[in-house]
Image (cartoon, rainbow, N blue to C red):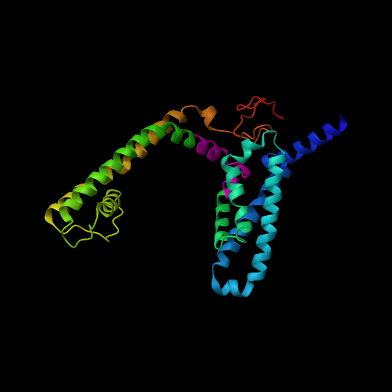
Amino acid sequence: MSKNNKQLNWKEKIHRVIYEADTPTGKYFDILLLVLIITSIVAVMLESIEEVDNKYHTILNIAEWVITILFTLEYIARIISVKKPKEYIFSFFGIIDLLSTIPKYLSFFLVGSHALVALRALRLLRIFRILKLVRFVGESHNFLRSLRASRAKISVFLSAVIILCIILGTVMYLIEGNNDTGFTSIPRSVYWAIVTLTTVGYGDIAPGTPLGQLIASIIMILGYGIIAIPTGIVSAEYAKKGTDTQESISTNTKSCQNCAASYHRDDAEFCYECGEKMDI
């Protein structure tokens, strides 16, 4: 019995250090983790410079291997310190942690995959938790909920835009297809419609007839209105979510050892996700 308790205490200590930043040890661990992430990203960037790589390739390679091994140990520790490992493995940070660890190993089999370690930059999002920027943590969580609530409306809107681009591209192909203006096929014309509607305007394809130029002008003006629609949809949902200030702002880094859920209230005794007793 004492052995089981000792093992449980060991896992709890690891969980508190690597998942939470409310304790000095947890904060120092995360700061060290951020330093390693930044060092790794800088090393990958330097490796892409031929002159630097030729001179310091061995040093950069050894440093990257050391960092990769440390990240591997950290990833394993995160898995064994929660009661439901799948909750962490398939979470946002769990996937990012895995993707930022395996590229160095994949470099044995796939040439160029090592550059994928730049994905480790996403792990820098943990800086909001470490520095206790609770307003940004809470608001980012609120923003993600607003995006999820808006996904149905945005999906309908994007579907309508895609259909519109196909129709406009087909029309432009019928008008400009016989001219030497670049509208050589319907897919290429649809590409032009997308580029024009989004007001990007690469200039690689341009209508040459008066009618084609008139339609292009209408598409350009229409593009300004279309770009603003998704912003309005998300803004409306964000305003609704923002009224619940208690839910939108979390003031600690308390994490559930059972399911690894975060964003708990200061006075939370149980996990809002799985109901597990929280370690206060």
The picture places residue 161, in percent across and down from the top left corner, at 30, 41
Residue 99 falls left or right of residue 76: left
Residue 166 in magenta?
no
Q: Name above or below for residue 194 compared with residue 204.
A: above
Q: Residue at x 62, y 33 (%)?
A: 261
Whether the magenta-drawn stretch holds residue 135 is answered as yes
Q: Which residues are magenta?
A: 123-142
**Residue displayed at 27% across by 55% down:** 188
Q: Which residue of the protein is positioned furthest toward the right in this rendering?
A: 2
Q: Quadrant of the N terminus?
A: top right
Q: Based on the displayed image, in which of its 4 quarters is residue 275 positioned?
A: top right
Quadrant where the C terminus sits is top right
Q: Position of residue 173 (x, y in %)?
A: 20, 52
Q: 34 and 174: which one is in front?
A: 174
Q: Residue furthest left?
A: 210
Q: Is residue 234 left or right of residue 83?
A: left
Q: Specify the quadrant of the image occupied by residue 177.
A: bottom left
- Where does the image place residue 202, in percent across and percent down from the top left? 30, 59
Count of residue discs: 0
Magenta portion: prevailing SS class: helix
Q: Name the residue at 65% across, 55% down.
A: 35
x%, y% of residue 44? 58, 62
| Residue 32 visible from this viewpoint | no
Q: Nearer the viewer, residue 260 or 106?
A: 106
- Res. 90 visible in picture: yes
Nearer to me, 91 or 183: 183
**Quarter residue 61 falls in:** bottom right
At 60% from the left and 60% from the top, the residue drawn is: 109
